[in-house]
Amino acid sequence: MSDHQEEQKLGKVYDGQLMRRLSVFLLPYKLAVFAAVVFLIANSLLQIAGPWLTKLAVDRFLAPAPHSVPPWLEAWLSRDAYTGLTQISGLFLGVMVLGLLLNFLQGYLMQWVGQHAMFDLRRTIVEHLQRVDVAYYDRTPVGRLLTRVTSDVDALNELFASGVVAILGDVCVIAFLLTAMIQMSPGLTLLLLAVTPLILLVTLRFRRAVRDSNRRIRTAIARINAFLQEHVTGVSVVQLFNREARASDDFETHNREHMDAFKEAITAYGWFYPVVEFLGMLALAALLSYGGYRIRENALTLGALIAFFQYAMRFFRPIQDLSEKYNILQTAMAAAERTFQLLDTQPGVTAPAQAASLPPGPLTVEFDHVWFAYKDEDWVLRDLSFRIEPGETIAVVGHTGAGKTTLTNLLLRFYDIQKGAIRLGGVDIRTLDPRELRRHFGIVLQDPFLFTGTLASNIRLGTAAITDDQLREAAERVNLADFVESLDAGFEHEVRERGAGLSTGQKQLISFARALAHNPRFLILDEATSSVDTETEQKIRDALANLIEGRTSIVIAHRLSTIQRADRIFVMHKGQLRESGTHQQLLTQRGLYWRLYQLQYKDQEISRA
């Protein structure tokens, strides 16, 4: 199923299993939910009080009728018209104020519960996204994940804040009103119900129209999110190739789809309420005619007819609301299904029940007949075996696609191998907790990634144990201190999204300081100097000796200077280790490394001579 097909997928109107799973997020707030339901039912009961008081005032004082006052109220209600109407008005005001208070409390509590439950759900989703495998992000668009955390959670919030409980309230109001109307006049009630099938037909037509519009709106929002994520991230490429006009046209297409879908929804709401109102007025006209006849026959009092009119006007309002709540419920069920589908995605790389631990002291790195494929049996690594001694610096070279970066991804357990074993100090890394494993590694990537915050927070990355002195020492050892001292705020200098405003070299030095400050036992440099200028490379090259001192280091090499410092060089070709040795040894063999050197590194060495 494609991403957009999944966004268009409609959920059931009610799915008991999904509701049970959603109720887990309501359990911490069950007392608030219970109180809201009590307030709602009480408020629904008050809906019949106002018209009944109107009937009492009319039949007792304005158009007196026999037996109009219940015996239990006879002793309290004055026989004087002025005093009696004042008493009834006071009761009516009390009912209105109490209804206002109950309505506020019920709405506030459900909004409060909805916001807290969705806060917990969003936190659960984000925590889950941090646990799933890197492979999941390889196949899942980021815009789609943003939709899960934003639009889908908002739909579920709507369900809790004004969906399920509101539906219960509407059902209670209808039931209480029907009970009161039947007791007052069964004939008028049947006449009122005669128009109900027409209202239901109109409601069904409205529901289908809004359902289709909401589906299109949801799909358009998902496409807009995906488009913005991609084009904002790649804005430099858009500008470089003068794609602004084309990008604007593409966005206009998605934006217009969203606008047209919203216009259809607005149109549906525009005709639905007036039609229901018109049918309601027809029903009231019929009630007026029939009620007048019953009054002439002395079978109905004037107060009862007026009260029945008020009941009838209140009867159609929850029917209108139910049609809208139906779409909220269906949209929320679809959002819940997609959300729980994400939460049900189990990480393939997990910690074993009884996780092992790495022994203290120097550790060897061993790949033992390792086979790995990202998909099926399209092998990226084939029967790969080697051993790295403690403290060794290993350079890995090879053509694009040879499997160099895959080595480090497997060593860090971003993916699990299909065959063979990878061991640290004789311990299979699959027996380790991935978080514990990665704690021993420092990594510097070709494209450094900085978070919004400060220089200090980007170096610490949440590790509070790194002191200010250690921060400064790391900066000095990677030649970052001069840059930091040139800033007015020093380490508290504000870093914008993705390190905007900093040069590639500056961001790379920050990445080096980050790796060094965490004092890892193993160091991985993934073409860490390939994107910097010659001057910055010189700074990094001078810092490398300090960085790799006392550490086992794996350097995915790009520049000759890095390779020449290595104790050994691994030459990868089509997923296999084809050659291994020092720089001079490999040149003497005149094999793959010699050919790579002739193609790439010889010119660099000549330019440095």
Image: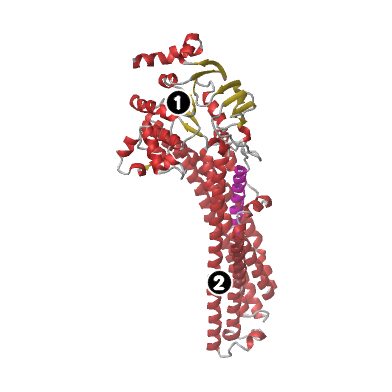
Point out the stretch of residues depicted in magenta. 322-343
Mark found first going from the N terminus, 2 or 1: 2
Q: Which residue is mark 1?
A: 527
Quadrant (top left/top right/bottom left/bottom right) for the C terminus: top left
Colour style of the rendered protein structure? secondary structure
- Magenta span: helix, strand or loop, mainly? helix
Q: Going 34% across and 36% down the picture, which residue do you hit?
A: 481
State the SS at label 2: helix
Q: Going 67% across and 80% down the picture, which residue do you hit?
A: 297
Rendered position, 433 above or below 103: above
Q: Position of residue 461 (x, y in %)?
A: 46, 41
Q: Position of residue 400 (x, y in %)?
A: 50, 21
Q: Is residue 334 magenta?
A: yes
On residue 99, which mark appears? 2
Q: CA distance from mark 2 to mark 1?
A: 69 Å
Q: What amino acid does circle 2 point to? A: Gly
Q: Position of residue 72 (x, y in %)?
A: 66, 85
Q: Position of residue 366 (x, y in %)?
A: 58, 25
29, 223: nearer the viewer: 29
Horizontal arrangement in the rendering, residue 539 relative to residue 370 (left or right): left
Q: Going 34% across and 15% down the picture, which residue do you hit?
A: 607
Rendered position, 558 above or below 22: above
- Which image quadrant is residue 1 in? top right
